[in-house]
Image (cartoon, rainbow, N blue to C red):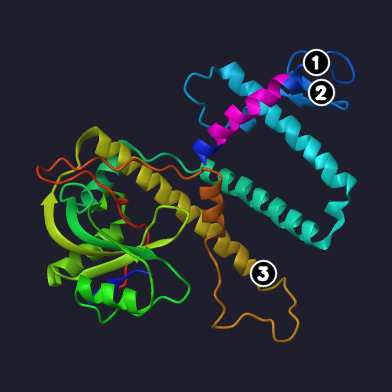
Amino acid sequence: MVSTHSGLASRGTLLVVAFGLAVAACGKNGSGDQPTGQVVARLNGVDITQLEVNAELQGAQIPPGMDRRDAEKAALANILTRRKLVEVTEERELTKTPQFQLQQRRTEEQLKVQVLARDIAGKIAQPTRDEALAYIDANPLTFSQRAVYLVDQIQFPRTASMPDLDDADTMESIIKILGDNKIEFRRQAATLDLVGAAPDFAKEIHTILAKNPNEIIVFPNPMPGPVPLMLANQVKESRIVPFTGDKAIEFATRALHNQRIQKALADEVQARRKELEGEVVYQEGWEPDDKTDVDTSVLGEAAAASGTVQTGTTPEPTAPGLPAPVTPAAPVAEPTAG
């Protein structure tokens, strides 16, 4: 049976490309007096400040060999170029179309929700060392009994109409199903490290493998990529590699803090949805019912988009004979046993 579970570098490159523009854009005299202080440039009478340049650079990876000022000049060139393109857009009255106005409203709403998510997250206190140690004790499968699995893995695209893999009991049968459905795949040896998984997921994997060590476990690749992937895994070997010490405490602190942030965000969403019940007037036939799929992760997604939720680095396996990981640590959502 199968158990299933339902860019910095590019910005750095952009800085290099834009640097040539920075010299040209900033070397010309703009309108008005010479900018001074926090005003680094002026375009048609509109100031561009050091704060805006810093915001443009936030999260960017400055290429090796480029000093901070050169990166700032390149960021300024990006701002100036974007402002000129905006002028063209407005001159052509493209911002007056219904499509633009709808997208603008949606974008503004998303930005405002991100600000709310950051505000909520910023009020969640960091866990204490004792709380982190208690979290470690409560999740032995992630720490003291951390398992690293050597697996036979099949990667294939995640599509809207996925074939049914529930009856596949071997990797060869999965390959046949994928072939019959003309789905490309790649088979490789890989490792799975459950440190990065949600504790409930780690427990579920442990339970599945305790019942049947040969069980094939399928889940979505949790790491972003150009093509969403599904990962089918069959464990060939496992090692217990305890995760302890200061790094484990740091990891537990982040995990516990993020957990509390996510709960606070979910509580906020639920409270506001409760308010909606008495505030919305629906056209007949548009009322939500039991079949309505309600997204309760809107604030959590906003927090992730704004970088509010911290991520930790999964420690490398140290058990002898295990290769370095070539797949993500584990998905963050829970599997469903088949």
Tell me if residue 238 comes above or below residue 159 in the rendering.
above
Q: Quadrant of the N terminus?
A: bottom left
Q: Quadrant of residue 234?
A: bottom left
- Residue 94 visible in this rendered orientation of the protein: yes
- Does the rendering let one see residue 338? no
In terms of depth relative to the viewer, which is nearer, 94 or 309? 94
- Identified by mark 3, the residue type is Leu
| Residue 28 magenta-highlighted | no
Q: Is residue 219 above or below residue 40?
A: below
Residue furthest bottom as drawn = 285
Front-most of residues 228 and 127: 228
Determine the CA span between mark 3 and mark 1: 49 Å
Q: Between marks 1 and 2, how big is the CA–CA gap?
A: 7 Å
Estimate the x, y position of residue 332 in percent, counting from the top left: 37, 57
Q: What residue lies at 13% left-to-right and 60% top-to-bottom?
A: 236
Q: Quadrant of residue 56?
A: top right
* 105 versus 313 height, above or below: below
The residue pinned by badge 3 equals 276
Marks 3,1: beta carbons within 8 A: no
Which residue has dot 1 on it? 35
Q: Which residue is mark 2?
A: 42
Q: Position of residue 16 (x, y in %)?
A: 58, 27
Magenta stretch bounds:
11-23
Whichever of labels 2 and 3 marks the residue nearer the N terminus, that label is 2
Secondary element under disc 3, as helix, strand or loop, is helix
